[in-house]
Amino acid sequence: MTSEDRESGAASRRPVEDEVDVVAEETQKTAKGGRDKKKGSFWKELPVLIVVALVLAFVIKTFVIQAFYIPSESMENTLLTNDRVLVNKLVYHVRGIERGDVVVFSGVDSWDGEVKLQEPSNPVAAFFRWVGTAFGVVPGEKDYIKRVIGVPGDTVRCCDAQGRITVNGVPLDERAYLHPNDEPARDPFEVKVPPGRLWVMGDHRSVSLDSRSHLGDPGGGTIPVDKVIGRAFVIVWPFSRAEIIPIPDTFNQPALRAAVAVGEAAPFAAGLAGAVPLLLWRRRQRSRR
């Protein structure tokens, strides 16, 4: 091969090499530009993501599940101060409130709050208070958490010869959830729970401001069923205490369960009793015709 051939071959290869260098450089620029665009789009989308997250949190909080902060000792040792619980807000659309349920309810226009909180000084502070309450970081001043002892129609009394709370004459063995140093109640009382209301008590009876503390209020210490926000069903914080909150076995006694069945059947029986005479009257009218 002559020197002229070698030079011509080198010359013919040079443009190809230059072209490869240019393509690689352009690719690097494009990749860098793509990353810049992604960064820019992320920051543009971040406010939208925050708004969507807040809207979803509001919807879930309003209709499904809400986290609540435990601010006091009134439910020890079932719930401790600073625990966080999740409250099921749909369960009572499926079934009725049962004895033994731990419920969160609003004390607005009835009971005074157990924990006094300062009012937010400005709209921004109010917004963060709302967010904190929604996620169970801040306690709600007018929200209570207690255990349901009596449902509508029950007679709750303190106490029998053994010092036990009775419901419709059936004694409750409360040792599974009552604070170890507490008695079921110190002062005697007897209450017939009105329709549409509940008798509730804290598990730490000696410090709990529950239905017993409001005997002189309208409703005789009971709370309206429609003020119940939902049932606390699980402790989620701290992780070391994470567990399901069950209904104690004492509320599953056959005598109490039978009372529930009778109570649920009563409206049906009353409706049936009213319907039978009407049906007989209509039959008589038809036979005359």
Image (tube, rainbow, N blue to C red):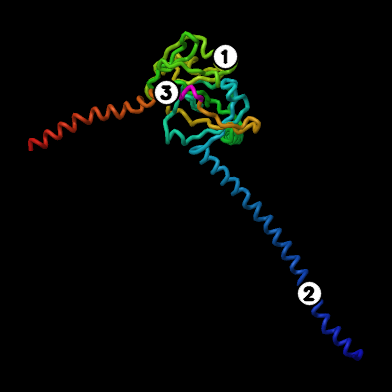
Main SS of residues in magenta: helix
- Camera-near label (2 vs 1) is 1
- Residue 171, image x and y in percent? 46, 16
| Dot label at residue 96 | none
Of the 4 image quadrants, the one containing the C terminus is: top left
At label 2, counting other C-alpha atoms closer than 10 Å, the crowd grade (few under 14, some 14-19, many 20 or more) is few
Q: Quadrant of residue 83?
A: top right
Residue pictured at 83% horizontal, 80% vertical: 14
Residue under circle 3? 254
Residue 122 sits inside the magenta stretch:
no
Tag 1–tag 3 contact (CB < 8 Å): no
Q: Earlier in the sequence, mark 1 or mark 3?
A: 1
Tag 2–tag 1 contact (CB < 8 Å): no
Total numbered badges shown on the rendered structure: 3
Residue 131, relative to residue 264: is it above or below?
A: below
Query: Label 1 is placed on what type of residue?
Result: Asp
- Residue 205, image x and y in percent? 54, 16
- Residue 246, image x and y in percent? 53, 29
Query: Label 2 is placed on what type of residue?
Result: Val
Q: Quadrant of residue 243?
A: top right
Q: Is residue 123 visible?
A: no
Residue under circle 2? 20
| Dot label at residue 182 | 1
For mark 1, give the secondary structure. loop
Marks 3 and 2, how far apart at CA: 86 Å
At label 3, counting other C-alpha atoms closer than 10 Å, the crowd grade (few under 14, some 14-19, many 20 or more) is few
